[in-house]
Amino acid sequence: MKNRYRTIWVSDLHLGSKDAKADLLLNFLKHNTANTYYLNGDVVDCWKIQQNKWKWKKSHTEVIRKILKISKESRVVYVIGYHDEILRSYVSHGIKIGKIEFVNKADHIGVNGKRYIVIHGIMD
């Protein structure tokens, strides 16, 4: 049986880097579900890819596939970070991958009714 949550937050995966813990995330996602997922920055390490110092493993592809599958059933919000800033054009052009929303920042309403801003790092 899976644990069900209102929101799951994931940050700093750095897929494409040798230190990414994709297997741990896949195991977590196997046992937990949510209505909304926030991928809060640096999900893909585009810096490593651009420097040609990247290490893409099968588990990294499996994470992407899993997130795409999740986006069919749940809301997935991808908040752009520093290492994946190349994806900012997705925001301005309204590009989506699957049903994943790409944003620079998001508003989250907590179960307590409070409003929270979701960002990765310092905003200009």
Image: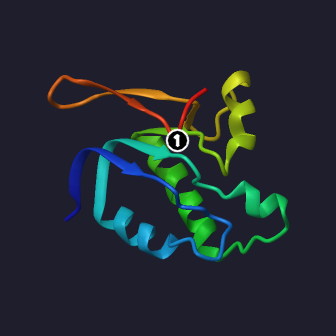
Q: Position of residue 65 (x, y in %)?
A: 57, 59
Q: From the viewer's perspective, is 93 left or right of 82?
A: right
Q: From the viewer's perspective, is 17 left or right of 50?
A: left
- Determine the residue positioned at 71% across, 40% down: 87
Q: From the viewer's perspective, is 98 left or right of 4?
A: right
Measured along the vertical axis of the image, is residue 117 above or below residue 6? above
Quadrant into which the C terminus falls:
top right
Q: Position of residue 11 (x, y in %)?
A: 47, 53
Quadrant housing residue 112: top left
> Is the residue marked by circle 1 packed among few (<14), some (14-19), or many (20+) residues within 10 Å?
few
- Determine the residue positioned at 43% across, 67% down: 25
Quadrant into which the N terminus falls:
bottom left
Q: Most extreme residue toward the left, as rendered?
A: 112
* Model colouring: rainbow
Measured along the vertical axis of the image, is residue 107 above or below residue 13? above
Q: How many marks?
A: 1
Measured along the vertical axis of the image, is residue 119 above or below residue 48? above
Measured along the vertical axis of the image, is residue 100 above or below residue 22? above
Label 1, secondary structure: give it. Answer: loop
Residue type (three-letter) at the residue carrying disc 1: Gly
Which residue is labeled 1 in the image? 121
